[in-house]
Image: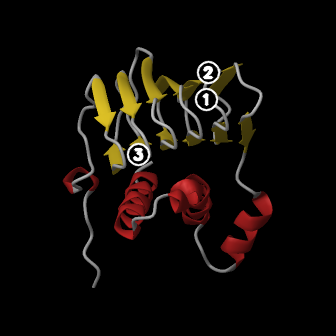
Amino acid sequence: MMKKTKLANMPEFLEKLPKKLEIKPNEKRTIITDTLQHSDIYLKEKSTLIFATILKKGWSEFQEINFHCEGSESKVIFIALIHGKTKEKFPFKTASLHNAPKTKASFLIRGAMFDDSQVDYRGHIKIQSNAQFADSHLSHHSLMLSKNAKVTSLPSMEIKNNEVSAGHEATMGKTDKETLFYLTTRGIDEKEAESILIKSFLETDLKEIPDEEIRRTLSQELENSLKNR
């Protein structure tokens, strides 16, 4: 039987983000959190950061995380999985600040919004003139599972170099009725079937994490959270 690891027991887990953090040259690091606080993270030459967070409990004030891609060929992947319920609010901003050549940043945000929950996300991309061949993208996808849930998505870009790739996308939708019906005809309870579809939607971007144990633990955390909704 495979051993299950709790999120808070993982060596990559941070209970609280430091106000300032440096990812050293050539360092490959993964950070796991279950909340967001204001932080400035500096990526040096050829460093890689995977930042994954599962958000189930909201907060009141805007939290801002700035990723400073200062070293050439530095890379950040930010993954946020949001399970919004009751009146929880999730106001936050990410900034991808490119100040060196061949830097990469991907921001992958997915939310399942129940009850009166709210997400207010603002994603900013800034590419300086010396950041040739920078590659930076934002995506924010939400399942709206209550008429009272609310999602705001405000991307912005400031680009000072023509030799770059940058963009953003945002979608809002509901669970697929045909797939839900198919699952119920196979003897799966409707609530369980909906949870399966929601979990599948939320964990789409976990494939970006190379560590299998981390993916499995995050997936289990999602499953437990959806069972208790």
Q: Mark 3 to mark 1: distance in Å?
A: 16 Å
> Which amino acid lies under the numbered mark 1 shown in the image of this protein?
Ala
Left or right of 146 in this view: 56: left
Residue at mark 3: 47
Q: Earlier in the sequence, mark 2 or mark 3?
A: 3
Q: Nearer the viewer, residue 69 or 226?
A: 69
Residue at mark 2: 128
- Residue 193 percent across, percent down from the top left: 60, 65
**Image marks 1 and 2: residues in contact by CB distance under 8 Å:** yes
Q: Earlier in the sequence, mark 3 or mark 1?
A: 3
Label 1's element?
loop
Label 2's element?
loop
> Which amino acid lies under the numbered mark 3 shown in the image of this protein?
Ser
Q: Mark 1 to mark 2: distance in Å?
A: 5 Å
Characterize the local packing of mark 1: few (<14), some (14-19) or many (20 or more) Cα atoms within 10 angstroms.
Answer: many
Q: Which mark is residue 165?
A: none
Kindly identify the residue that appears in the image at 47 percent across and 25 percent down: 89
**Image marks 2 and 3: residues in contact by CB distance under 8 Å:** no
Asked if residue 27 shows in the view, the reply is: yes
- What residue occupies the far top of the structure in this picture? 61
Residue at mark 1: 131
